[in-house]
Image (tube, rainbow, N blue to C red):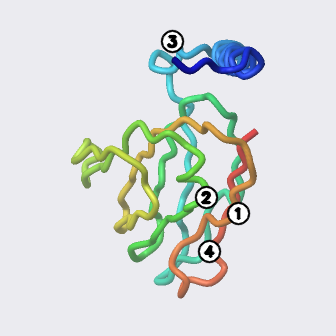
Amino acid sequence: MTFLPVNIVALATTSVAVLLSICTSGPLSAADMGDQPPIEVDLRMEGGSECQRFVPESLTLEAGRLYKLRLINRAERSCYFSSNKLADAVYTRKVVVKDGAGKDAAELYGPIRRAEIKVGATVEWWFVPVRTGVFDDVASRKSETGMRAVIEVK
């Protein structure tokens, strides 16, 4: 029979206790995550025949809160949204694709790295930020220069 030294057991026990206290303290507890109403935030893609800018160009979100980020294409052509850094820092609850009449056409589950949004369409990305940081890689296609945004999670 193998025994762990007492200090390793104490360290492991303390680590678990600290993690539990972090997860259950603060503005929301683990039980609240599914019950909280989403905070709705819009990020529009605007421009003429070329997607030229995100509006607004920066967003500030709070870790641990449920968001419904509405990606709205108001440009005259399909636009892309991507942010690998943000995708790695959030728990995606679902992605809802709206049809032309604004009704739910599809729901997707799992991490989202890139989305193409057709002219006049809206995609809703429901997520909870689980890591703080400044995510400055919000962009459209490389050919669409200048179309950048920054999302900060505090």
Q: Earlier in the sequence, mark 4 or mark 2?
A: 2
Q: Earlier in the sequence, mark 2 or mark 1?
A: 2
Tag 1's secondary structure? strand
Residue farthest left in this picture: 105
Which amino acid is tagged 4? Met
Q: Which mark is residue 31?
A: 3
Can you say whether 78 is above or below 88 in the image?
below
Q: Which residue position holds label 2?
A: 85
Mark 1 to mark 3 CA distance (whole Å): 31 Å
Mark closer to the observer (2, 1): 2
User: Which is nearer the eye, 5 or 141?
Assistant: 5
Q: Which residue position holds label 4?
A: 147
Dot 2 and dot 1 residues touching (CB under 8 Å): yes
Tag 2's secondary structure? helix
Q: Which residue position holds label 1?
A: 136
Q: Earlier in the sequence, mark 1 or mark 4?
A: 1
Residue farthest bottom in this picture: 143
Which amino acid is tagged 2? Lys
